């Protein structure tokens, strides 16, 4: 890529907007995921009685559905990011390509 094209890209206001939006959402989702994951780990470490409490009359404890929630939450949050990226960032990227080229 030539230096002129890179410089035009970096100074484009839409590109700066794209970088800002994408970074902000990425950090928010990262923080949410860390809270959920480490919250689960902290529950395992510090509230063993809750995690060992049986759900109903079977052998399943609360640790299993909460752990399943963490896994499902990870898939859902990834899907939401992909959907948002496809709807917002791809359109903005195409606008930037047209302006810079």
Image (cartoon, grey):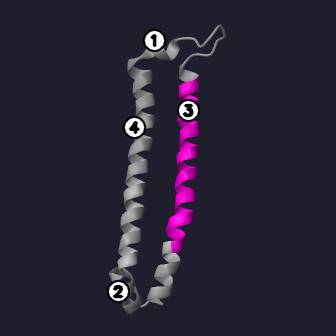
Q: How far apart are marks 3 and 4 (CA)?
A: 13 Å
* Above or below: residue 10 compared with residue 57: below
For the residue labelled by badge 1, is the local secondary structure a helix, a strand or a loop? helix
- Residue under pointer 3: 69
Residue displayed at 53% across by 73% down:
91
Q: Check if mark 2's residue and mark 1's residue have beta carbons within 8 Å.
A: no
> For the magenta stretch, what is the residue range?
65-91
| Comes first in the chain, label 3 or label 4 | 4
Label 1 packing within 10 angstroms: few (<14), some (14-19), many (20+): few
- Residue under pointer 4: 35
For the residue labelled by badge 3, is the local secondary structure a helix, a strand or a loop? helix
| Comes first in the chain, label 4 or label 1 | 4
Q: Of residues 33 and 1, which is closer to you in this image?
A: 33
Determine the main secondary structure of the stretch shown in magenta: helix
Residue 73: horizontal and vertical position, in percent? 54, 39
Residue displayed at 57% across by 16% down:
61
For the residue labelled by badge 2, is the local secondary structure a helix, a strand or a loop? helix
Q: Which of marks 3 and 1 is in front?
A: 3
Q: Of residues 24 and 50, which is closer to you in this image?
A: 24
Tag shown at residue 49: 1
Q: Quadrant of residue 21?
A: bottom left
Label 4 packing within 10 angstroms: few (<14), some (14-19), many (20+): few
Q: How far apart are marks 2 and 4 (CA)?
A: 38 Å
Residue displayed at 41% across by 70% down:
18
Q: Distance between the residues labelled 3 and 1?
A: 19 Å
Q: How far apart are marks 4 and 1 (CA)?
A: 21 Å
For the residue labelled by badge 4, is the local secondary structure a helix, a strand or a loop? helix
**Furthest residue to the right?**
58
Residue 20: horizontal and vertical position, in percent? 36, 66
Tag shown at residue 7: 2
| Comes first in the chain, label 2 or label 1 | 2
């Amino acid at each position: 890529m030539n230096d002129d094209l890179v410089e035009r890209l970096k100074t484009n206001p839409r590109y700066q907007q794209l970088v800002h939006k994408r970074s902000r959402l990425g950090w928010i989702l990262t923080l949410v995921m860390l809270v959920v994951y480490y919250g689960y780990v902290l529950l395992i470490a510090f509230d063993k009685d809750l995690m060992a409490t049986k759900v109903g009359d079977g052998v399943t404890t609360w640790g299993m559905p909460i752990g399943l929630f963490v896994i499902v939450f990870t898939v859902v949050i990834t899907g939401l990011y992909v959907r948002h990226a496809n709807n917002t960032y791809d359109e903005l990227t195409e606008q930037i390509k047209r302006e810079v080229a």
